[in-house]
Image (cartoon, rainbow, N blue to C red):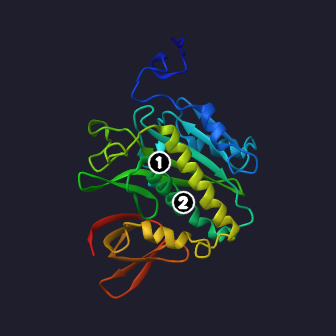
Amino acid sequence: MTPRDASEPNGSRWSDLDRPPLNITALRRGLVRQGGLWSEVDVVQRTGSTNSDLVARAAKGEVAEGAVLVAEEQTAGRGRLDRQWTAPPRSGLFFSVLLTPSEVPVARWGWLPLLTGVAVATGLSRAAGVDTALKWPNDLLVTVGGAERKAGGILAERAGDGGVVIGVGVNVSLKDDELPVPTAGSLGLAGAVSTDRDPLLRGALRSLEDWYGKWRAADGDAGVCGLHEAYAAGCATLGRVVRAELPGDRAVVGEAVAVDGDGRLVLATAEGVQEPVGAGDIVHLRPA
C-alpha cells in the first residue's frame, strides 16, 4: 500500500481511482529528448494558474523554451476575457508551455493560439478517438448527444520580450453533473475510447511540437507550412452565421466566410461588407 502523502488531494493519491494522478516519470521519458522541443516537464498537484506560474518563472529566467507546467487541479484558471476555468481535481488536462520563436517575425505570432488549437485538436482526436472541431479563435468543441459543446480552450500570454506562454485546458472525464455550464462538454461525454490523461497529454504535446516545428521552419508563414489550410478545415465557425462581440461594446453579425492570412475571422455582413475580426467573442447563431 502506498503511504499517505499530504501533498495529494484528500491525503491519498488513490482518493479517486477513476482519476489516477499523472505519471510524471513516464511523461518525462516520453516527451523530453535530445533535440526535441520539450526541455522539462513539471507536474504540480494544485495551483491557481499554470499560465501565471510559467509567465512568472520565465520572467525570472528560471525556464527555457519548451518548459511544460501541468497541474492536477487549477483553482484560478483563466480563459479568454478573464473567464474562470474550474474543474474537479484530475478531471482534465491543465497545462502551459513556453515558446520563444525569436526567428519568426512578431507580426506572425498571432498564429500561435490557432496553431495550438490545431495541434491539440489533432492530438486529442487521435488519442481519444473523438471528433473535435475548433471555434474561432481557440475553443475546442466536441459533440455530445448531437449538440456542439465546448470541451477546452487556449489562452496565450506574452512572457517578457521574447516569449509566449500558451495555456491549454481540456475537460477529460467530467460527468454531466460536474459541468460548469450546460453548454460545456468533455471528452468522456463525447464517447472517448479512453480518458487516461497520460497518453492524451503526450498526444497533444507531440502534435504541438510537430506543428510548431513546421511553422517555425516556414518563418511563421501559416500558408507555407499548411497551418492556414488545416485551421480552416477544422474550424466549425466557418460557414456559420455568427455574432462577433467586439471591444468597445460593438457587435457585428454576419457569415464567417474565411480566416485571413493574419488569422483574423472575416465576416460577410448583410450590408455587403467583409469585416475582419482580430479580437472578440464569437457566438454561433445558426448554420449559414
Amino acid found under the numbered disc labelled 2: Pro
**SS of the residue under disc 1:** helix
| Horizontal and vertical percent position of residue 249 | 38, 66
**SS of the residue under disc 2:** helix
What number is the disc on residue 127? 1
Q: In which quarter of the image is residue 41?
A: top right
Q: Please state the total of marks drawn on the protein image.
A: 2
Calculate the distance from the C-alpha at mark 1 to the C-alpha at mark 2. 21 Å
Image quadrant in which the C terminus is located: bottom left
The residue sitting at the left extreme is 145
Q: Residues within 10 Å of mark 2 (few under 14, many from 20)?
A: many
Amino acid found under the numbered disc labelled 1: Ala
Q: In which quarter of the image is residue 243?
A: bottom left
**Nearest to the observer: residue 121 or residue 96:** 121
Looking at the image, tell me whether mark 1 or mark 2 is earlier in sequence order. 2
Q: What residue is drawn where x is 47% and y is 46%?
A: 169
Q: What residue is drawn where x is 45% and y is 33%?
A: 90
Residue 49 shown left or right of residue 218 in the figure: left
Q: What residue is drawn where x is 36% and y is 82%?
A: 268
Determine if residue 111 is in view.
yes
Determine if residue 157 is in view.
no
Q: How crowded is mark 1: few (under 14 residues within 10 Å), some or many (20 or more)?
A: many
What number is the disc on residue 248? none
| Horizontal and vertical percent position of residue 246 | 41, 67
Residue on which the image places disc 2? 113
Q: What residue is drawn where x is 70% and y is 67%?
A: 217
